[in-house]
Amino acid sequence: MIIKVVSILVIAALCFTGFAGGWQAPEPEAGSAEAALTRALDEAGLTADQVSDLRIDYEIDDGKPEYDVEFRDGDWEYEYTVDAETGKILEADKDYEPPAVTAPAEKPPVAEPAPEAPAAKQLSADEAKAVALAHSGLAEGDATRLRAEFDMDDGIAEWEIEFNCGSWEYEYEINADTGAILSWERDDD
């Protein structure tokens, strides 16, 4: 009889506290490294099981506590700076970083060609600006100091797009041949 009563009390306690059936992990505590990670993953549109090479560092920058959150998803590297007190994303950076391929030792390094004007099949400066603005969710009228610069980086023709909106500074690298975003960064000035 005593065992039956104890079993019922244990089951009731488990049900009451949520450990039985549909138990879910509690929300991360505000200001924790876990909360910063959750905020960065939400911003990236990813889940914890989709990322690798996870790194979270706590630091004090200009007297304010923040977390630097870094992780990879395939060939993409993400870096976020999250305010440790408010959970606000202060900086965001996403770079295309495929695994390095090493050339055989006997081949001399290839010199990078000088930047040249984009070929006719490549995106124009205005098209590259439109890609960056669409990704940021801003209209051209919202952006200030909008500029585009053509460059060759590791043999890839790209547009470097920079602009501001309020206190945010945006930087994009866009493949001039495909229109793909190679990297982007958003910093709070």
Image: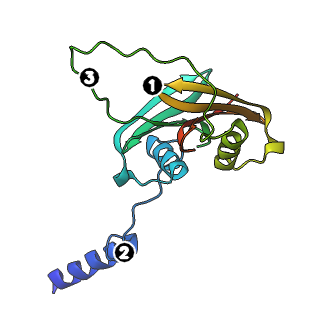
Q: Earlier in the sequence, mark 1 or mark 3?
A: 3
Residue hosting label 1: 154
Residue hosting label 2: 22
Tag 2 secondary structure? loop
State the residue in front, 123 or 119: 119
Tag 3 secondary structure? loop
Q: How many marks?
A: 3
Q: Residue furthest front?
A: 120
Please state which of the two labelled residues, at mark 2 or mark 3, is closer to the viewer.
Answer: 3
Q: Residue at x 29, y 29 (%)?
A: 101
Q: Mark 3: which amino acid?
A: Ala
Tag 1 secondary structure? loop
Q: Residue at x 58, y 43 (%)?
A: 87
> Which x, y percent locates residue 158?
57, 32
Q: Residue furthest right?
A: 141
Residue hosting label 3: 103
Q: Residues within 10 Å of mark 1 (few under 14, many from 20)?
A: few
Q: Residue at x 21, y 20 (%)?
A: 104
State the residue in front, 77 or 91: 77
Q: Residue at x 34, y 14 (%)?
A: 109
Q: Mark 1: which amino acid?
A: Asp
Could you tell me which quadrant the N terminus lies in? bottom left
Q: CA distance from mark 1 to mark 3?
A: 14 Å
Residue 65 falls in image quadrant = top right
> Which x, y percent locates residue 108?
30, 12
Q: CA distance from mark 1 to mark 2?
A: 51 Å
Residue 177 falls in image quadrant = top right
Q: Earlier in the sequence, mark 2 or mark 3?
A: 2
Q: Residues within 10 Å of mark 3 (few under 14, many from 20)?
A: few
Q: Left or right: where does residue 118 sit relative to residue 77?
A: right
